[in-house]
Image (tube, rainbow, N blue to C red):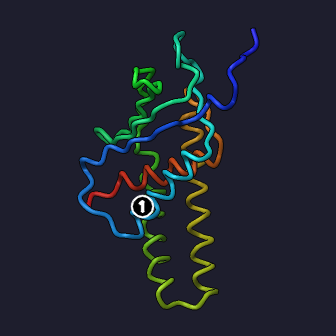
Amino acid sequence: MADKTPDSCRRIANIVLDERTVVRRSPDVEHERAVAIFDLLEENHFALKAAPERDGADGPYNLYLSIQDNRLILDVRDTGDGELCRVPLSLAPFRRIVKDYFTICESYYAAIKSAPPSQIEAIDMGRRSLHNEGSEQLREALADQIDIDFDTARRLFTLICVLHIKG
């Protein structure tokens, strides 16, 4: 039987970050978080591969992101907040890339204050490359359970990085 769910349903309608562990964020990081959430809600592709047989299971979705016991928890719900599934994802494979990404972001934010444009551009290219690598790693880690496009993965990777900040 062919899937008749419209693509307009296969999306995140609302996203909530569990920020109980976040102590503080710089204005730059807060801006990145806000932009990632805005862009994600404006345009995304997100679909459960094995959605339960019930109304709302094909989307759109409310997504709650949290970090618990060194795992990213994607708590996927229907728009009425009925539970659909919880996807725990080990963060261990992401440690290096997140650490490297934070390091290069610090260099980037420092550079934009005083470095020449060519240096800022070089650092930004490295930053984007690491971000792309983390995004692809996230897509691959979720591939068995959730179908997301590259842009959605990029925005979710940004939010994962934000959740890592402990102050």
Q: Nearer the viewer, residue 124 or 140?
A: 124
Residue at image location 27% in from the left, 54% down from the top: 22
Circle 1 packing at 10 Å, graded few (<14), some (14-19), many (20+), is few
Residue at image location 45% in from the left, 29% down from the top: 76
Residue at image location 54% in from the left, 9% down from the top: 53
Does residue 88 sit above or below 43 in this rendering? Answer: above
Residue 30, image quadrant:
bottom left
The location of residue 63, given as percent across then percent down, is 45, 35
Does residue 119 sit above or below 4 in this rendering? Answer: below
The location of residue 68, given as percent across then percent down, is 30, 38
The location of residue 143, given as percent across then percent down, is 59, 32
The location of residue 66, given as percent across then percent down, is 35, 41
Does residue 70 sit above or below 143 in this rendering? Answer: below
**Looking at the image, which residue sits at the far right?**
2
Q: Quadrant of the C terminus?
A: bottom left
In the image: residue 23, left or right of residue 16: left
Residue 139, image quadrant:
top right
Q: Nearer the viewer, residue 21 or 14?
A: 14
**Looking at the image, which residue sits at the far front?**
80
Q: Indicate the amino acid at tag 1.
A: Lys
Q: Nearer the viewer, residue 82 or 85?
A: 82
- Number of marks in picture: 1
Helix, strand or loop at disc 1? helix
Residue at image location 52% in from the left, 36% down from the top: 13
Q: Quadrant of the N terminus?
A: top right
Which residue in the structure is indicated by mark 1? 99
